């Protein structure tokens, strides 16, 4: 008995599938969630990265905002969950990929021009060098810095790249400042501009 029920149910399901595919109703094509580079264009003036802690650093969280000033990108960051009165290296990295538990999937510092590591605003520093952030006695850090060589889109574009908070202070040594492990990671995306 059970042997005959299975083919009947399977046959009925296939009939419904064929009927569904042969109706005269035109199929709706789903809108693609992917935005092409041409659609982004030069109109993007604001970007944002939401920072989350890496494995073992789950308390680290924050928001980093990026604004096109016409003469570089202004970075405004607020990061919480840091050790009180601590200082941390803060950089834009090559890839917007925080899938690795230790954020190693973000690659190295964003350095499209092949410069030496340095402080933000120095003519020959990495485009992604944002210096250090300093936490207050409650573990909150606020920083504002201008990245003169960065752009949101176009040449030296930061859109789609990674933001990293390091465990230690950036000592500005070569090649990358010796700031240690990656304790916070975020991906730079298009910000919704409120009108």
Image (cartoon, helix red, strand yellow):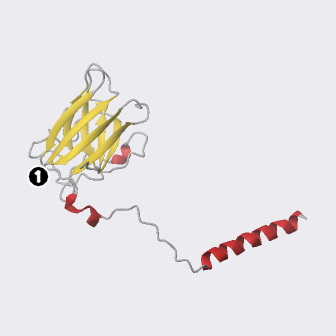
Q: Is residue 179 visible?
A: no
Q: How many marks?
A: 1
Q: Say which residue appears at 75% left-offset and 71% top-offset.
A: 12
**Near-viewer residue (144 or 14):** 14
Q: Quadrant of the N terminus?
A: bottom right
Q: Is residue 98 visible?
A: yes
Q: Can you give x and y, in whole percent of width and height, for residue 118 in the image? A: 15, 40
Q: Can you give x and y, in whole percent of width and height, for residue 67 in the image? A: 19, 47
Q: Quadrant of residue 182?
A: top left
**Near-viewer residue (187 or 17):** 17
Give the side of residue 26 with respect to residue 67, left or right: right
Q: Is 161 rendered above or below residue 86?
A: below
- Give the secondary structure at mark 1: loop
Q: Can you give x and y, in whole percent of width and height, for residue 129 in the image? A: 19, 42
Q: Say which residue appears at 19% left-offset and 55% top-offset.
A: 156
Residue farthest to the top, as pictured: 137
Q: Quadrant of residue 184?
A: top left
Neighbours of disc 1 within 10 Å: few (<14), some (14-19), many (20+): few
Q: Say which residue appears at 49% left-offset and 71% top-offset.
A: 28
The residue wearing badge 1 is: 70
Q: Is 10 rendered above or below residue 46?
A: below
Q: Say which residue appears at 11% left-offset and 52% top-offset.
A: 70
Give the side of residue 190 with respect to residue 123, left or right: right
Residue farthest to the right, as pictured: 1
Q: Can you give x and y, in whole percent of width and height, for residue 162 in the image? A: 31, 46
Q: Is 32 rendered above or below residue 113?
A: below
Q: Is 106 rendered above or below residue 23?
A: above
Q: Quadrant of residue 54?
A: top left
């Amino acid at each position: 008995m059970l042997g005959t029920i299975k083919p009947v149910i399977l046959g009925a399901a296939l009939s419904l599938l064929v009927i569904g595919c042969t109706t005269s109703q035109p199929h709706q094509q789903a809108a693609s969630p992917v935005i092409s580079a041409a659609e982004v264009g030069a109109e993007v003036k604001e970007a944002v990265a939401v920072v989350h802690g890496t494995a073992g650093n789950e308390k680290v969280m924050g928001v980093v905002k990026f604004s096109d000033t016409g003469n570089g990108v202004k970075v405004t960051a607020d990061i919480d969950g840091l050790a009180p009165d601590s200082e941390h290296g803060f950089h834009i990295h090559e890839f917007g990929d925080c899938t690795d538990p230790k954020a190693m999937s973000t690659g190295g510092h964003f350095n499209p021009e092949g410069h030496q590591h340095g402080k933000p605003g120095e003519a020959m520093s990495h485009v992604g060098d944002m210096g250090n952030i300093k936490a207050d006695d409650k573990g909150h850090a606020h920083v504002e810095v201008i990245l003169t060589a960065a752009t949101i889109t176009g040449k030296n574009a930061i859109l789609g790249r990674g933001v990293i908070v390091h465990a230690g202070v950036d000592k500005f040594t070569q090649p990358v400042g010796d700031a240690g492990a990656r304790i916070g990671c975020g991906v730079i995306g298009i910000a919704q501009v409120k009108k």
